[in-house]
Amino acid sequence: MSKLRSCFAITSFGIYKHWDENDKALPKIKTFTTDIPAELDIEFGFIINCKKAKGKKLTYCIYHPDIPDESGRIMAPFSGDVYVANNDWDFYLGDTIWPPRDNKVGDWRMTIELAGEVLAEKTFSVLVEHGDGEIQFWKHRGY
């Protein structure tokens, strides 16, 4: 008799609309990208779909660039555990930029593991856009 195998896949990644962690609905994707502008309150990350994995414990971790805390020490990676709720389940792992934005620039690596094995991983590059670039020109005009 064959065993059912769990299946894990990233279904979307990039910049999302604002997400409320108390809301059951996952955030909606705005832009598929790994290059994130260093804007306050921008929401970025990825969504993983888990099939045939109900009850399994996933461990997630967000490795920030060397961001200091209030006392000037480098913050530890943000990590935690979550249990797969049903046999076709989506999970959002993401973060946002908070003030001051200048020390948030760099690579943000996000991982999801099951029993020490990496199931999903994305690295996002948070970048400061040049103030005189074409993107900034149009952004200031509402486009």
Image (cartoon, rainbow, N blue to C red):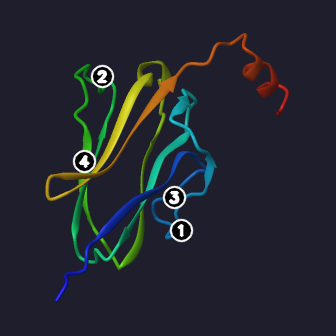
- The disc label shown at residue 25, or none: 1
Mark 1, residues whose alpha carbon is within 10 Å: few (<14), some, or many (≥20)?
A: few
Q: Which residue is mark 2?
A: 66
Mark 1 or mark 4, which has the lower sequence index? Answer: 1
* Total labels drawn: 4
What amino acid type is highlighted by mark number 4?
A: Ser
Q: Amino acid at mark 2?
A: Asp
The mark nearer the N terminus, 4 or 3, is 3
> Percent x, y for residue 121?
34, 45
Looking at the rendered structure, the secondary structure element under dot 2 is loop
- Which SS class for mark 4? strand
> What is the distance, in whole Å, between disc 2 and disc 3 at their CAs?
26 Å
N-terminal-most mark, 1 or 3:
3
Amino acid identity at mark 1:
Ala
User: Disc 1 versus disc 3: distance between alpha carbons?
Assistant: 9 Å
Separation of marks 2 and 4 at Cα, in angstroms: 16 Å
Query: Which residue is tagged 4?
Result: 79
- Mark 4 Cα within 10 Å, few/some/many (few <14, many 20+)? few
In the picture of the structure, the residue carrying the numbered disc 3 is 20
